[in-house]
Image: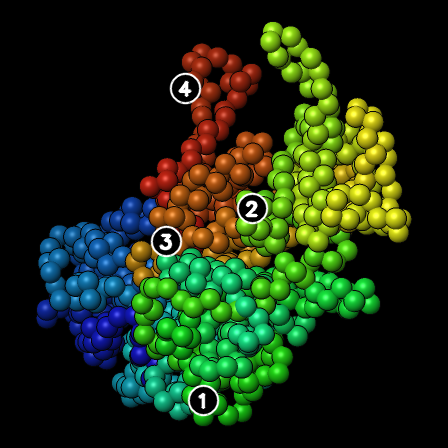
Amino acid sequence: MSRFNPSHNVLPIYDAAAAWKESCLLADGSALAQGGNLWTNTLLGELDQRFVKNLDAGGGDFLSKLKVQLSEGSPDCRQLMAESLWLTLLFPSNVGAAKKRENVLEIWSWSGEDLSATHPLLEDSVLEGIGSAGTAYNTHRWRELVFLIGALRDFKARDAADREQIALDPWAFSGWLSGLPEARHRQLIHILPHLLFPDTFERISSEGDKRLILAGFGDTTEKEIKKWSTVEIDRALLELRRRLEEEHGADIDFYQEEFESQWKNQTKNWLLSWNPSRWTWDTLAADRARTISGEKADNRWRCSSSKPREGDRVFLIRTGSPPKGVVAVGKVTRAPYEVEHWEQARADAGETMRFVDVAFDSVRDATSDEIIPLTDLQSREPGQEWNPQSSGIEVKDKAARTLERLWKALPPIVAGATALEGGPASGEASAKQFAPPLNLILYGPPGTGKTYRLKNDYLPRYYDEAGGRFEFVTFHQSYAYEDFVEGIRPVAENGTVTYEVRPGVLKRLCDRARRAPDKRFALFIDEINRGNVAKVFGELITLVEVDKRIRTDPSGNRLASCKGLEVTLPYSGQRFGVPANVDVIGTMNTADRSIALLDSALRRRFRFEELTPKPELLESIDDGQGNAIDLRQLLQAMNARLSRLLHRDQTLGHSYFYHVKSFDELRRVFAREILPFLQEAFYDDWRQIRYVLADQAVVEELQLVRARTQSAAVLFPKADPAEIGDGEAFEISREDDITADAIRKIYEPPE
């Protein structure tokens, strides 16, 4: 039933709402004052005059303006406003119970009477909230109060039979409420029906979420559902709930991960397979330990399908030898891509292998941990293929929900050693040994995972038992040919300075690679666009081309059959060529310098792969009060504004938020990384920064960067105002002062 809440006990809230319906809606009594009569047409009419028709759109917070508006009102009118606010605050959990109680008590105190802070209907259990109502519901609460007062005036003006039918019949209540003027724009048309009829209406305050749910679980598009009435939407939701609860044999909540993933992000689910007898998963123990500690384990995995996308959910099933079953879950972090086949003959014939990159958030060792047995899956969901011949088949929605539920029901893992068993990563080093050389540049905005990809995806392929077959260098403006290829360096010996030719980083690596032609080597160049590429590479700009590479024997001598190029180096006079077993992999940050400015000679000789921000890899975090902050929507909103005000190359990458697990960590990232990035990107133009943060649209308490007028008359007494003029000063919120609503309003701005 829709009153089911997986996070906490909400029965006291529904009891409070039922008490209000009985004493205030059906009668004219009071929720907080024993024996009082507050919810009368007369007092509602007074509130209409004092508040609705006397709105204050000026500066100041809600309570200070409300006090002025009600200053001429009767004591009962002020108490009615306190109870009205109490009613509208029963649902939202994104406002703390203490703050709700404080506001209600303050408004009540304006009547000249005291209300006990220990009143049963002001307890934390009543005021902790049922679900998030969004930022706008809080920042523009006056709009909801205006609607509530108008709705109750309409209700109280009806005859007794009509009032009773509306109050007792859930569909009559919903039809009446949603049929009032301006109703479709108000969240109360979703909140009040749920509070009063929690077994009929969903715990959802947004029509947008309701439409997405129906579209995600059905065949009707969201565009078509927009044409439905509120009652039609709610009836369809009730029918959907009954079907899903019958299917799962238990109460459900649409915000549980196994259900939310199907409607909110429209992600798909995929089954990857692993046969230990065919692939050795060398990092199984390390990956298991990493996920036990709360980190993600990044891997690449064979995938026959080309359809998975970043953010899709993946399940890894162990096949081949027992025990068989699902051993890991995670998300796709890179869509399917092709690499050369690991067999040289097949690679020469142009054959490739398809992989996806996966971040596992939970890994189990079937030899020591409990897993989801293959037999259980086959008996529970016989319509799904569970023992595929290839890795990468789609998991149907119902089967995916069953999988999620079974995975969460597994007992916690007991940390300890695991057997080393195999996965597709095992063949990765050998797969690249005889493949054509790779010239690759990863480019994109900061935080999109360029350096991360270098260190975690490519660099491990060049490790061996001797400390690594690679060199890592970062280009900068003063980096030169002498550092990269070779140059003359002074040497002091016995008081005498002599000069000798010293090899640069590339030449040193190539010399090693010549003597080990059966192994692959790599040069990693971070920030490649920050150096003068033409001067740094010199004549080697030609030698790095794939078809200009040389091949050598184990002695380092060039093979007679080799058609590659060599040149005579200017300092040493040696013949030099770039071996075919050397890969050159670089990164460039497009926020620093556009790719269009990169040396054209380099652009012709390298393959470029763009890494863009991937909000779909992010999840929501808890703000510390049981409410979500959607990191995905947060990044999307800021990047949309950055793209409009600057350029798509100067957006924020997902890695800024990828490892954020708590609200304190999010505040730290904003204060120490996001705000400094914006300051640099906009050259201290704080007005533009405020646009990105949506600070210009909200009250001061929700602003991260506040603008203060500087009066010329105050700063410069007796100076000519026309000559100097007023100015603006900007104040940045301290890390500890950043609130959850101040961040939420970036992607969920008030109306």
- Foreground mark, 1 or 3, reads 1
Give amino acid for label 3. Ser
Query: For the residue labelled by badge 4, is the local secondary structure a helix, a strand or a loop?
Result: helix
Q: Which callout, 3 or 4, points at the residue further toward the start of the chain? A: 3
- Residue at horizontal 48%, vertical 40%? 673
Mark 4 closeness class: few <14, some 14–19, many ≥20 residues within 10 Å: few
Rendered view: 584 above or below 305:
above
Q: Which callout, 2 or 4, points at the residue further toward the start of the chain? A: 2
Give amino acid for label 2. Ala
Mark 3 closeness class: few <14, some 14–19, many ≥20 residues within 10 Å: some
Which residue is denoted by mark 3 in the rendering? 662
Position of the N terminus, as image quadrant, is bottom left
- Foreground mark, 3 or 4, reads 3
Foreground pick, 271 / 30: 271
- Foreground mark, 3 or 2, reads 2
Q: Tell me whether the residue at label 4 lies in contact with that at label 1, contact meaning CB atoms closer than 8 angstroms.
A: no
Q: Tell me whether the residue at label 2 lies in contact with that at label 4, contact meaning CB atoms closer than 8 angstroms.
A: no
Is residue 670 visible in the rendered image? The answer is: yes
Mark 1–mark 2 distance (CA, rounded to whole Å): 45 Å
Give amino acid for label 4. Val
Query: For the residue labelled by badge 3, is the local secondary structure a helix, a strand or a loop?
Result: loop
Give amino acid for label 1. Thr
Foreground pick, 215 / 472: 472
Which residue is denoted by mark 2 in the rendering? 466
Image position, residue 519 (x, y; %) = 68, 52
Mark 1 closeness class: few <14, some 14–19, many ≥20 residues within 10 Å: few
612 lies left or right of 467: right
Which residue is denoted by mark 4 in the rendering? 714
Question: Mark on residue 375?
Answer: 1
Q: Which callout, 1 or 2, points at the residue further toward the start of the chain? A: 1
Image position, residue 711 (x, y; %) = 44, 24
- Residue at horizontal 81%, vertical 40%? 577
